[in-house]
Image: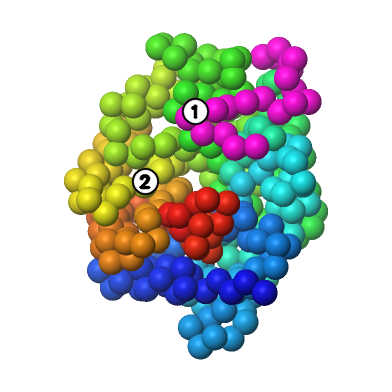
Amino acid sequence: MLKIGWSLRRWCAVVALAMSAAAPAAAALVKGADVSWVSQQESAGYSFYNASGAKTDPFVLLKNLGANTIRLRVWVNPSGGWCNGADTLYKAKRAVAQGQKIMLTFHYSDSWADPGQQTKPAAWASHTLTQLQADVYSHTQGILSYMKSNGVTVDYVQVGNEINSGMLWPQGQASGSNFSGLVSLINNGYTATKAVFPNAKVVLHLANGYNNTVFRWFFDGMKANGAKYDVIGLSHYPTASNWSSLNAQLSTNMADMVSRYGKPVIVAETGMDWQQAGAAKAMLADVMTRLTALGSNGLGVLYWEPQAYPGWQGYTWG
């Protein structure tokens, strides 16, 4: 039986330090983790342990470590079933049982979607833009209704994942001043979300949260084309050598997003090399201080797959 606990304890230490550095608004902050891999890890024989060495349900462990929000990715028809509707519900119900809020991240793909790949699901491969608009609505509404009918309230919904260059390529690709196709897809995801959970916050999420030029280009395009959303999400993956400068750029970008578009911001993903624990603590404490400086417009931060240590599926930034 494989034991994993150290990375979650480190995550606790990181958050505890960050909270002490940002005490005035700490209670209002999202302090979360994306743990979408956890059911697959458990199926592979992984167990999780607290600081005393006691085997502990990972969602209980996360709650005890201060996590108040759980982020889960959703794929359309994934190989093996991991991150499909049923697997997502299984994890979401475990989080809800611990009083944690839920953020769902719709990739609109059968596997990973990020700036380098936004592949349509196989079942949608030949669909036109008009058909994809209906697909996005149906998939989003269907998953959210499935959650709701099973007692899960979804608090945040990401329409797409790291959509710097759009999603559902090529129909939803963004380039130059061409955003109309992408916005039509986003707005169908937004409308589907509000039909099921009117109070859920719809997040548009980009990678490289330090890059103000890209964020301005993208969200200017959103504004010009009438995109509907509530929150701007950012990914932030600095290294031990550049985190200080990238945090400063992230902070400048977040403040600009709030000022320019009137939207709150959330660091939807962050992480750092697990072998750089000291730098990771300092980085995250600083990020949370910068978030609290934004007041109610700095919603919080979610660490990406902290339980993945020591290199689950090759990932070493947990």
Label at residue 116: 1
Please tell me which residue is depicted at 57% across the width and 27% down the height of the picture.
118
Q: Quadrant of residue 221?
A: top left
Q: Position of residue 94 (x, y in %)?
A: 68, 67
Residue at 71 percent across and 12 percent down: it is 128
Disc 2 residue type? His
Cα separation, mark 1 vs mark 2, equals 16 Å
Residue at image location 33% in from the left, 65% down from the top: 277
The chief SS type of the magenta part is: loop
Q: Position of residue 253 (x, y in %)?
A: 27, 38
Rendered image coloring scheme: rainbow
Q: In terms of depth relative to the viewer, which is nearer, 197 or 67? A: 67
Q: Where does label 2 land, which residue?
A: 236
Element marked by disc 1: loop
Q: Residue at x 51, y 57 (%)?
A: 311
User: Above or below — where is 157 with respect to 305?
Assistant: above
Q: Disc 1 marks which amino acid?
A: Gly
Quadrant assignment, res 250: top left
Label whose residue precedes the other's in the sequence (1 or 2) = 1
